[in-house]
Amino acid sequence: MPIDQIALIVAALGAVGIGLAHSILGEQGIVKPVLKRMNWNGVPPDADFLNSTVRFAWHITTFAWTGLAVILLAPLLGMESNPAFVPLTIAMTFAITGIVTLVASKGRHLAWIVFLGIAAGAAWPYL
């Protein structure tokens, strides 16, 4: 296997690995301590919704970095000459993010509309 392919694999694994580390270690070392200190008294909507939103905003980075890892692997998958590969990978990344946002917030956090709109816009020219 040529060194350039090995470099892409290492980079993609690094992107996924840093995303997982960011989510796992960040949940314990940053998200939980921050949420314990946050005071949502008197702020609508309820604290559970706001805490979930803060937590999700932290973890969404892992979705994005995983999508970038897939793009890094395009040449190994024979997709470097396919003009649809990068936009469709971005579309899938935003679609997953939008669906997770919709389900996790039970539709209350309206970012799902934006995420799915980005997914549709990125995919539209290739459908």
Image: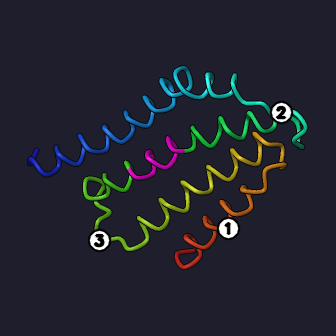
Position of residue 45 in the picture relative to residue 67 (left or right): right
Question: What element does badge 1 sit on?
Answer: helix
Mark 3 vs mark 1: give the one in front. Answer: 1
Distance from Cα at disc 3 to Cα at disc 2: 48 Å
Q: Residue sitting at 61 percent across and 67 percent down?
A: 118
Residue designated by label 1: 117
Residue 72 to residue 21: above or below: below
Mark 3 vs mark 2: give the one in front. Answer: 2
If you read the primary sequence from the N terminus, does the residue marked by circle 3 or circle 2 appear first?
A: 2
Position of residue 86 in the picture relative to residue 24 (left or right): left
Distance from Cα at disc 2 to Cα at disc 1: 28 Å
Q: Residue sitting at 29 percent across and 66 percent down?
A: 80
Residue 71 point in image, percent of width and height: 37, 56
Mark 1 and mark 3 in contact (Cβ < 8 Å)?
no
Position of residue 65 in the picture relative to residue 117 (left or right): left
Q: Residue sitting at 32 percent across and 57 percent down?
A: 74
Crowd class of label 2 (few under 14; some 14 to 19; many from 20; radius 10 Å)? some
Residue designated by label 3: 81
User: Where residue 33 is drawn, which disc sits there?
Assistant: none
If you read the primary sequence from the N terminus, does the residue marked by circle 3 or circle 1 appear first?
A: 3
User: Where residue 47 is drawn, which disc sits there?
Assistant: 2
Amino acid under disc 3? Ser
The quarter of the picture where the N terminus appears is top left
* Magenta span: 61-68
Residue 111 to residue 52: above or below: below
